[in-house]
Image: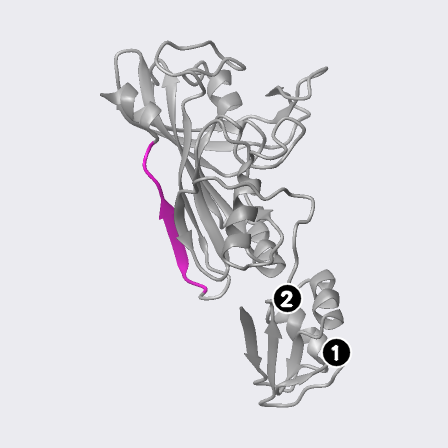
């Protein structure tokens, strides 16, 4: 994957300014690119202090090899939604952790992505962009290089990376659309549970009722922030805990996990600059509830 910029004005003194202002490359990544000889001026390797002139061509090769050597390669079936030179987008099943841990050292999604990258000859670090709880299903995006990772994280920070979920929640709402704006903090004496706390981080969830059943509602949740357990905490706080969410509600005879699925994301592609919208179907355990 390569970036290219043609100098069209005399406003730039050196390559550093172009990498920062036009290509949005961080100082940290610039250092790595220069050290690995991946920045070119008119096809000649240069450093960021090199001066530039009108019509010069600056190119950056982002294909340098990096590997997550501490992640074990594990063969597993991956449900690939989309893939290009920038990222790999997967539909994560419930019950699969995104990151390796003491309890999931070899069976996380990252282990499976490592195996997949090894299989296709791609030496890359494993860079998951968004997070999903162990028992939440749906879309996970892995960046294939640090530049793409930085671009997508910036979009998350400025709310141009849109995340949509389907949740099955207890009871019925007075209004079919609404917004929950309640700050979330870690619950005292717990490393897992979150709670509503006025001293917590700002958390905003927009919701829309899609359909109603005997004793639960199907809700689309659109996150404006990305706090841990945000949808689960917010829905519980307004009296509508997710079906099967034993941490913030009660168990359910309909499903043995929280009924939450990340079904759609929308963001600006770092290279094409076009809006890319990706989605996936509900998993079988949630579909079964609706039949």
Quadrant assignment for the C terminus: top left
Q: Residue at x 49, y 48 (%)?
A: 161
Q: CA distance from mark 1 to mark 2?
A: 16 Å
Q: Quadrant of residue 207?
A: top left
Q: Which residues are magenta?
A: 273-282
Q: Which residue is mark 2?
A: 64
Q: Quadrant of residue 265?
A: top left
1 over 120 or under it: above or below: below
In the image, which disc is placed on residue 195?
none
Q: Nearer the viewer, residue 81 or 190?
A: 81
**Residue furthest bottom in the image:** 54
Q: Which residue is mark 1?
A: 47
Left or right of residue 216: residue 25: right
Q: Residue at x 40, y 52 (%)?
A: 82
57 over 65 or under it: above or below: below
Local crowd at mark 2 within 10 Å, few (<14), some, or many (≥20)? Answer: some
Q: Residue at x 40, y 57 (%)?
A: 275
Of the image marks 1 and 2, the number of the one nearer the N terminus:
1
User: Residue 186's spot in the image, x, y percent?
Assistant: 67, 23
Question: Magenta span has 279?
Answer: yes
User: Residue 243's spot in the image, x, y percent?
Assistant: 40, 16
Q: Nearer the viewer, residue 219 or 87?
A: 87
User: Residue 283's spot in the image, x, y percent?
Assistant: 35, 30
Give SS at disc 2. Answer: loop
Left or right of residue 77: residue 281: left
């Amino acid at each position: 994957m390569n970036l290219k910029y043609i100098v069209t004005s005399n406003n730039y003194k050196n390559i550093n300014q172009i990498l920062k202002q036009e290509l949005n490359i961080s100082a940290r990544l610039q250092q790595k690119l220069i050290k690995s000889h991946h920045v070119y001026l008119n096809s000649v390797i240069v450093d960021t202090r090199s001066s530039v002139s009108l019509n010069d061509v600056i190119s950056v090769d982002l294909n340098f090899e990096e590997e997550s050597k501490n992640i074990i390669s594990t063969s597993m079936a991956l449900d690939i939604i989309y893939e290009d030179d920038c990222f790999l987008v997967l539909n994560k099943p419930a019950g699969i952790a995104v990151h390796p841990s003491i309890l999931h050292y070899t069976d996380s999604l990252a282990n499976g992505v490592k195996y997949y990258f090894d299989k296709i000859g791609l030496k890359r670090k494993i860079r998951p962009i968004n997070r999903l709880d162990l028992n939440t299903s749906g879309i996970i995006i892995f960046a294939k290089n640090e530049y793409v990772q930085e671009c997508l994280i910036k979009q998350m920070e400025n709310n141009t990376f849109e995340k949509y979920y389907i949740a099955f929640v207890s009871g019925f709402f007075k209004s079919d659309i609404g917004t929950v704006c309640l700050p979330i903090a870690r619950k005292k004496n717990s490393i897992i549970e979150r709670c509503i706390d006025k001293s917590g981080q700002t958390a905003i969830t927009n919701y829309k009722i899609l359909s109603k059943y005997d004793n639960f509602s199907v809700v689309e949740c659109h996150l404006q922030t990305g706090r841990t357990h945000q949808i689960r905490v917010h829905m519980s706080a307004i009296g509508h805990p997710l079906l099967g969410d034993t941490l913030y509600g009660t168990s359910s005879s309909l499903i043995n996990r929280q009924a939450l699925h990340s079904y759609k994301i929308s963001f600006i592609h770092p290279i094409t600059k076009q809006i890319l919208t990706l989605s996936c179907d509900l998993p079988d355990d949630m579909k079964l509830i609706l039949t």
